[in-house]
Amino acid sequence: MHSSYLDFAPQEWTLDRVLEWRAGLSPGAPFLAFADQPVLTFAAAWQQALDLAWFLHQAGIRPGDRVATLAGNSALAVLLWFAIDLLGATDAPINPAFSGKPLEHAINLVETDLVIAEAALLPALQGIIGALPRVARLMVHSASEVLPAELGGKPVLALTLRPGERPTDWRPPGAAHNDLCSILFTSGTTGPSKGVMVTHAQAFLTARQSVEGMRVTGADAYYCAHPLFHMSPRFCAIYAALLTGAKVSLDVRFSARDWLRRVRESGATVSIGHGPLLEMIYAEPERPDDADTKLSRIGTSPFPKHIAMDFERRFGVKGIETWGMTEINIPCWHPYDESLRPGSCGKIRSEWYEFQVVDPETDAPLPPGRVGEFVVRPKLPWIISPGYYANPQATLKAWRNLWFHTGDSGYIDADGWVYFADRLGDRIRRRAENISSYDIEVAANAHPDVLESAAVGVPSEYLSDDDVKLCVVLRPGAASAAADLLGFLASRLPHHMVPRYIEMLPAMPRTPTQKIMKSQLRAAGVSAATWDRKAAGVALRSLIGKA
């Protein structure tokens, strides 16, 4: 038996091998805690995953099949992911908040004949069941609800754990390292969701990088509140725990208000977070005991530069900034022993990846310090996604000229430090100047009445040119006018970054990971609710120095 995950050859990088190996190496060690349920040991998780795999095998699931799952966070959802992969099949977890056309699109995209769902989500399926021609049956996991016999003429079966029914000599088929482990859906903020094909080797390497980048050991405990249909909780926490023997406390959902309490209750030493989540945590009222936890480090993408240093001070943690995406894992890590560099996401893990910054129009490499598009390619087969499932056009567009084009922009300095600037789609081009929406938002969020903001480009009177629109959510009870905020910004931003338009919103549209959906803000454009400084006759020169 291997003594470490480092002993696994790349051809052995599969979830079924790792799960069985860890159950044999650390059978009685605590693995997965969820809500008030008993903590699963590694051995128990292995046995229950086998029982589920046998149940699904009996139901006809075979290697290469795709199974759509629709559920919130739970221990059973984790075991179901394991069971599907043990069979050499591919799980396709779908956002449980989906309904209507987005849900119909996701299920039809993966060309599955089986959907496994929570009982509470059956109404969402009922509304679209007639538009799912390939789906032949539904399985539902339910603790107590009485299930209907059929939905839209399609049989509904109960998904149950049945210990003792599995033959003791039965072995699941397992998978190869280049087989698909999962199909994970993009946020779909700029169009219909795409299904990112994730190989077993890719999932293993993401977990390994997370272990090494954050120095996780078997003595560690994770706190994770991310939804399981994303890569971060799966590979950066749960799979990383399989590699090391660490424990994972999985929460139902993220809550900024409850985050610190849940970290304490779980005894977590390590966690993960996206930039918007950390900003929400940081926005909670500060207390003298905020650092009174066992938490010592948190992996984040990004680590918002305007709060990074104070976040570390306030919560007594080391922030480890990264850059990556589902298609390519996490190629860039802040070296663990290097001091914080606000704004930099670290250095490329060059043993695994090649990386360039290129002109987004020509794909020509750019010199250090020049902002362009990040492109990546692997040095080992099967460690990044082979493409978008059933979407060859999107695959060819992203994987062109032998590089994966990320759609992220930034630069790399002469010492190899990588700096993320913006999504190319979020970049604002005004009068030949490329403007970072982030810089505008940092300035706006410094206003005492502003809870959060988002800057987007809207068409100006010139061809292929933008004006800046700032969308703002005020703090409760605040009543700042747009003109007052403009004066505040005029003294803090270069002239070309000062917004022409400001619109106050009750709340921002968000993805499930709390990223602001800027595509919706751009699509809203300029309306009757939008304040226009030119229409109001406000000259910027008259404002400078008055704030």
Image (tube, rainbow, N blue to C red):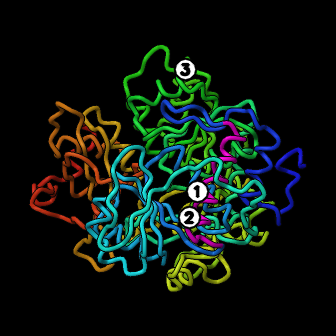
Give the label on residue 91, or none: 2
Residue topped by disc 1 = 81
Q: CA distance from mark 1 to mark 2?
A: 6 Å
Above-or-below relation of 26 to 184: above
The range drawn in magenta is: 41-62
Contact, mark 1 vs mark 2 (Cβ under 8 Å):
yes
Count of numbered badges drawn on the protein: 3
Amino acid found under the numbered disc labelled 1 = Trp
Query: Considering the numbered disc 1 on the image, is that residue within a helix, a strand or a loop?
Result: helix
The magenta stretch spans residue 113: no
Above-or-below relation of 526 to 386: above
The C terminus is located in which quarter? top left
Amino acid found under the numbered disc labelled 2 = Asp
The quadrant in which residue 476 appears is top left
Contact, mark 2 vs mark 3 (Cβ under 8 Å):
no
Q: Where is residue 326 shown, x and y percent of the image?
A: 57, 62
Estimate how packed mark 1 is, as few (under 14), some (14 to 19) or many (20 or more) residues with alpha carbons within 10 Å.
many
Q: Where is residue 428 shown, x and y percent of the image?
A: 38, 64
Residue topped by disc 3 = 291
Query: Considering the numbered disc 2 on the image, is that residue within a helix, a strand or a loop?
Result: strand
Q: Where is residue 350 shown, x and y percent of the image?
A: 77, 60
Pick whichever, 147 or 416, lies toward us: 147
Q: Residue at x 71, y 45 (%)?
A: 242
Q: Residue at x 27, y 60 (%)?
A: 521
Q: Residue at x 14, y 35 (%)?
A: 479
What secondary structure predominates along the stretch shown in magenta? helix
Q: Nearer the viewer, mark 2 or mark 3?
A: 2
